[in-house]
Image (cartoon, coloured by chain):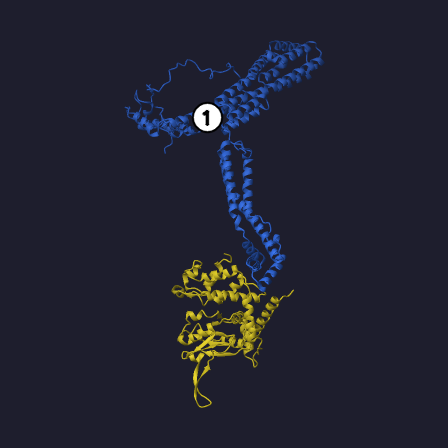
Amino acid sequence: MSTAIDQQVEGFQKQFNAVKQEIAKVIVGYDDIIEFAIMSLLASGHVLLEGVPGLGKTKLVSTLSEVVHLKFSRIQFTPDLMPADITGTNIVREGEKGEKVLEFQTGPIFANIVLADEVNRATPKTQSALLEAMEEQTVSVGKTTYKLEQPFFVLATQNPLEMEGTYPLPEAQLDRFFMKLKVDYPTAGSMSTILNRTTRLLEPHVNRVLDGPQILDMRKTVRSVPIARPIQDYAVRIMMATHPNSPLSNPLATKYSRCGSSPRGAQALVVGGKIRALLNNRVYVSCDDIRAVAYGALRHRLLLNFEGEAERIDTDTIIKGILETTPETN
Amino acid sequence: MADKELIIGLLERVRRRLRAVRRFRTISAGLSLALIIPVIFKLIDLAVPFRGATVLVFLSIWGIATAAVLIWRTWKAQGQETMTGSAASLDRLAGLQDQITTAYWFIRHPSQSEWVEAQIRKTAESAGRLRVESLYPASTPRTFYRASALLAVLVILNFIPQSLNHNWFRLEGAPPFRLSRTDQAIIDHAKKLLDKTEAAKELDKIVSDLQQGKISADAAQQQLSDLRQQIDGGNLELNNILDGLTSMANQLGQSAALSSTAQAMSSGDLEKAAEEIRSLADKLGVTPSDVLRELQKNMSQAAGNSPAVLQDLSKRMQQAADALKSEDPQAGKIALDNLAQALEQLEQKMTGQQQQSQASQQLADLQNSLQQEAASAAAAADAQLAPSPSQGENAGGGGAGGDQSPNGAPKPGDSPGNGQGSQGGNSSGSSASGAPEDLKPGQMTKLDVQLKMEGLKGQAGKGGQLQDVEEASKQERSAMDYRNVPSQLSPAQKDALNQNRLPREQREIVKYYFEEIRPQTAKPIK
């Protein structure tokens, strides 16, 4: 017997998979990256994509914007980019009667999907222009605050290799990203497919399968999924284990981390878990769901100390240790 | 509501199952550890048997302690199986990804949400498909096998057929008096020789009483002595029989036809004598009449001179003589066959009595052994009461302080311990303690030493009174008069029986002593 909830879950899966399949027409070999990116969109979060140039990060974002039928804008971050170049500015315009009036010219941030390409190349001042938009979903220019249209979704990319002339994102800004996804080199099998698709006359064409209202509905569905207290406690224990001074701290975190995840990390674990539960045709969150999203949700929230930096410890290693040692039941 | 009841019911069943499994594991693990103790104790008991009371106390303490620990552990583990834990266990085993855990939490914390209701409904569907018996199959923990093996070892150890082994399952322990292996061997041999006779039962009773502490070692020796007298009573008859046979053989030997029979009788081989008589009976028809007369005469005289113990044999011999006198070959043959039969019966009787004689000798050995053990025990008790070894050495040193002759021989008036200088003195001093381990070889006595008379200085004791001993005590006096009993044993057997028993701890000293007093020329240069 199919109930309304079952139908809702089924609809969610269909829409999610449709977006995924459309993006997969263009982007090859990054199924999990695509999935987490869509997951972040549905969780009302933002994504930081990290990878060397040429792996298709920008292409992934642009393809996503094409598929979801939303207003898309791209901001190429450069050292001379100014905050007003992002948010927009008041310009003096001549009125109908010849009078001078100030008119707000919206910046590229006023879109549904914003691609902040090479976000670490802009100065901190410009990077901080994104802070309010990402968290409050508003833009303040002068004395006026403008509300951003929903859904609002920022996808930022950064290159981990070229550190000359870059400004690493401050912790406060990193914490605003729902997930940080690492884009690795594609496999040999995937490369062959990429070459087949990109070196011919006709490039793959994607269809628009989702619009803004549908995304907002899906977001509501995600928030409706219940989570039992024992599972929620498991997420909390994982988050607390990242803190070096917590009684629940993991030995690796104690040794190598300077600062652990904020409560946003736990929120990301739970919301990410809910989406994954829906994708697995479940109406409740399990510990497996929490574990599945832990890397993306926590890796940018865990700050290494001097020892960790010196020994080039990857935060994923610490998270792996935490997942292996944190008990499911209290 | 039905969905919730179904889930709760399932969890209850799982909890009961988990509790049963945990209890079984706890008890198995506890027993696998606890049983090590009695097994070790039993192994020690096999080497050094414990008394019944010791075994009883040990088993009681062990049993109470084990039961208390197991009850405590089981009681302590009672609250460990929670419904949440059961749900987590079920999720893990059935691969339900926390479905039951989530559902149970929402049942306990109701929420007006369609999603929650859907979750509980789906969980109930999954729960209906679960089979607790297949998810939690009855498995036997490894500790159970270990405990079973230990129990089997304990049972086997208790049922090992060994004289020193006592079955704890029958609450048996070592008897108050423990026989040595030598004593036990002697008893077994004596019992075998006595073979189901009254004396064997009597011996069994004495040994049993001694082991159970009903009689003392002295009383046992006395009873063994009585038993020996009882057995040796038959030996007197055997001696008379042998004497009678010898005299009969002398008489019969005067006849040429009976010379081989007489020889066999005098040597005690009555079977051969019987064969000779039968052979004579077969040839009776062709035997000349003068020979028959001579036979009749000698047999009649032999029958007439025989002792009372050979009454049956003499009667048959007289009947044979009478039959020969009648010159009836048929009657003569029958009478001679009867005589041969009588000889064979006598042979059997003698064999039985010889066995009894050997048994008596075994009992004498047992008596000696018990006596020596009692003496050793008394010496050990004295050694504990005697002065400490340092005091013993001082005593020896005092002896060494006496004047010595140039060759080291003691001067008159010196104590016996100082004869060979300081070493001899120390040796004597050490031995004064009386403990066997203090017996160390001293300076050897050389054959070229001319022994001199010494005056011994006695030590006045406390209390007691002087007693003049004029004769051996009644206990040590022989119960029977000396008789020249011809031995049936070979020289090697005699040597084996006649050798004196040396206490084990003194054998090396005796050996060393004889090696040292060997003439110097024969001694190899080291």
Q: To which quarter of the image does residue B7 belong?
A: bottom right
B466, A265: nearer the viewer: A265
Q: What is the quadrant of the C terminus of chain B in the image?
A: top left
Q: Is residue B461 above or below residue B65?
A: above
A88, B71: nearer the viewer: A88
Q: Is residue A102 above or below residue B156?
A: below
Q: What is the quadrant of the N terminus of chain B in the image?
A: bottom right
Residue A128 rendering spot, x and y as whole percentages: 42, 74
Residue B4 rendering spot, x and y as whole percentages: 60, 57
Q: Chain B rendered in what hue?
A: blue
Q: Dot 1 corresponds to which residue?
A: B373
Question: Left or right: B371 with respect to B519?
Answer: right
A64, A57: nearer the viewer: A64
Q: To which quarter of the image does residue B304 belong?
A: top right
Q: Is residue A56 above or below residue B308?
A: below
SS for tag 1? Answer: helix
Residue A330 rendering spot, x and y as whole percentages: 49, 56
Q: Chain A rendered in what hue?
A: yellow
Residue B352 rendering spot, x and y as whole percentages: 59, 20
Residue B35 visible: no
Q: Amino acid at mark 1?
A: Glu
Question: Left or right: B506 with respect to B493?
Answer: left
Residue B430 visible: yes
- How packed mark 1 is, by other alpha carbons closer than 10 Å (few <14, some 14-19, many 20 or more), is some
Q: Residue at x 54, y 66 (%)?
A: A274
Label 1 resides on the chain identified as: B
